[in-house]
Amino acid sequence: MDFRLSEEHAGIRNLMREFAEKEVRPRIKEFEEKGKFPKELVEKLGEMGFMGIFVPEQYGGMGSDILAYAIAEEELARVWASLALIMSANNSLSGAPILEWGNEDQKKKYLASLAQGKALGCYALTEPDAGSDVTRIKTRAVRNDNGWVINGTKQFITNVAKAKVCVLIARTSDHPHHGLSAFIVETSTPGFSVPKIEKKMGLHCSPTSPIVLTDCQVSHANMLGQEGDGWKVAMQTLNGGRINIAAQAVGIAQGAFEEAVNYARNRQMFGKRLIDLQDCQHKLAKMEAQIEASRWLTWYAAWQKDQGHDVKLAAARAKWFATEMVQKITYDALQIHGGMGYMDETPVERMFRDARALTLYEGASEVQLEVLSRKFLK
Ligand SMILES: Cc1cc2nc3c(=O)[nH]c(=O)nc-3n(C[C@H](O)[C@H](O)[C@H](O)COP(=O)(O)OP(=O)(O)OC[C@H]3O[C@@H](n4cnc5c(N)ncnc54)[C@H](O)[C@@H]3O)c2cc1C
């Protein structure tokens, strides 16, 4: 067993850290104040290879692995979660299913532009009446001479307002699981519309929107996998994606922890520094241990995926643990800042709000616990 990062992984960590510190951190305020999509930063991530970290070089990606992706996601989320979510929806939810389920033509057509930040990707599973329970999906694809005609409504879709490519799950027959199929839908297709961008509690620069599909015609060539593979595509995509959401949680927590340490070192009270008070020290020590535990669960799950193992359990464990952990860490980091932590000039205020979404998307915490507890029932 070797717990050291390889030269390649350490290099990717340094590269992303430098980018996040030098090019992202100074611009967060400018974007957050207007809730503006950080287009130039997304393009820069694409140029650096981060929009297709694990996509093989032959398809225009960086050609690295899932561990590298988790490390990069953590580093970016440590500084700005909105941008980290834009990157992860593109990689995990669009690039990954096309890489894992796409045929050669689909990979050649879509992967390079997704990986290089020239076309943003998104993933449409959730519907107004189907969130945790995917079998309730109503969006329907009906076969015709030209391929499939899709009608329905999707909800809470990250990136779609700026995306060109959408991996979409729709119903092609009534069977709860086998009746689902996956499609690659270009967002410029007539009948594909994005009526609004939602106003959210946090992650203000990561756009979240519904999709309305009205007689949206896609060709046979744009079915991902075979008819009836939609359930498997959806679950495999989420299992991989959860590792990255765990990494996102570790990154936000690490950022909040560092802000708290900094503040406690400088804040004076009762004739000493806040950090000299034992309660504060213990709070910080517990935070550090929880973050480290989450990081190792995440890296272990990433390593398992790189080995080609089934990551259902490892991903659910890491996702549940890390996304619950970051709630407490951002709460405590804000508490250490006192009233200042509630003011929007401190980064922990934003981190506290941003972190809240992580126990919800890519499977709520309760869903992760369902996955984990199934093991004991057999
Ligand atoms: C910011 C953001 C971005 C998102 N991006 C995307 C995206 O890009 N693509 C996409 O398809 N979706 C996306 N989603 C949707 C997200 O995946 C869903 O919100 C999530 O799956 C939960 O579904 P729901 O909101 O319908 O809640 P519901 O499924 O209705 O859940 C309601 C409550 O029931 C709980 N619950 C669920 N199962 C159980 C159980 N077995 N036992 C007990 N309680 C349970 C849940 O935890 C929750 O507390 C996004 C959501 C957010 C907030």
Image (tube, rainbow, N blue to C red):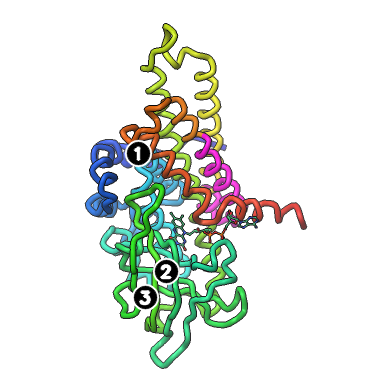
Q: Between residues 292 and 28, which one lies in front from this camera angle?
A: 28
**Disc number at residue 167?**
2
User: Between disc 3 and disc 1, whose residue precedes?
Assistant: 1
Circle 1 residue: 79
Circle 3 residue: 105
Residue at mark 3 to residue at mark 2: CA–CA distance: 16 Å
Q: Quadrant of the C terminus?
A: bottom right
Main SS of the magenta part reads helix
**Which residue is painted at 26% across and 40% down in the image?**
29
As drawn, 129 above or below 29: below
In the image, what residue type sits under mark 3?
Asp
Looking at the image, the residue that sits furthest to the bottom is 145
Give left or right: position of 312 versus 299.
right
**Which residue is painted at 54% across and 18% down in the image?**
279
Q: Where is residue 238 in the image (x, y as percent from the top left)?
A: 52, 59
Q: What stretch is highlighted in magenta?
A: 303-328
Number of residue marks: 3
